[in-house]
Image (spheres, grey):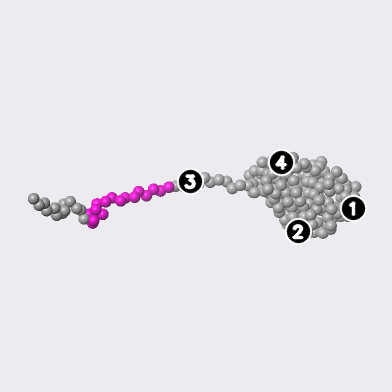
Amino acid sequence: MTHNETGSGLRPSRRTVVKGAAWAVPAVAVAASTPASASSPVPPEIQFGESQLCKLPGASQADNCYDKGYVAFLVFDNTANTQPYYLCSVESFTAKGAELCVVGISEVTSSEACQTLVAPNDGILIPAEQEVTVAVWTNSSSSSASGTFQVTFTGSFEGCPSVDAPEVQSGHLTGSSWPGDDQGSCKPPAACTTVPSACESICATTA
């Protein structure tokens, strides 16, 4: 007995298969939520235009063991940060390409503070959203002319002695002579009319 299977009801056409197939690929929308993290604070910026440089020419401060030094009253600007910054030390102070010996730094807040060199472990507090003037005492310059100065300092928002990578900033400072016997034209802050001794430091020189 012969069976004649035409396949008309057994083999659906390709067109029918495609037409009846449901290949619906669901569209999955993934919302990548990136937390908005606050930008990391940056070290204070030295406002060279607001800072002042005083020369300690020749052996004018020989009793304090200076010879051709500078004191820079640098304005550290922390107004862009909502965190206090701790200035731990000034590692180097370069005048016109020649590195001076850094005697130390002091706070310009009172005569006692300005005459006292701050230990790196203590540091100087620069409050959030404020500016603070810091005196940087140096010695042994080859000259006492004005020019471009480069300052390398260390500090941290966590406090001293924990410090971040050294920060290097440079700018132009115009200096005038220290007002010894009211002869020089430099006008240091009222709290800093007395020069701290360099005699116990590695920067001590004798005329």
Asked if residue 148 is positioned above or below residue 89 in the image, the reply reads below
First reached walking from the N terminus: tag 1 or tag 2: 1
Q: Position of residue 68 (x, y in %)?
A: 86, 54
Q: Secondary structure at mark 2?
A: strand
Question: Which residue is disc 1 drawn over?
Answer: 59
Where, by quadrant of the figure, is residue 8 drawn? bottom left
Give left or right: position of 49 versus 6.
right
**Of the residues shown, which amino acid type is indicated by label 4?**
Pro
Question: Which residue is disc 4 drawn over?
Answer: 161
Q: Is residue 151 visible?
A: yes
**Disc 4 to disc 1, how far (Cα)?**
34 Å
- Give 102 or 51, whichever is nearer the viewer: 102
Q: Secondary structure at mark 4?
A: loop
**Which disc is residue 148 wearing?**
2
Q: Secondary structure at mark 1?
A: loop
First reached walking from the N terminus: tag 2 or tag 3: 3
The stretch in magenta equals 14-30
Question: Which residue is disc 3 drawn over?
Answer: 33
Q: Position of residue 85 (x, y in %)?
A: 68, 44
Name the residue at 73% across, 44% down: 88
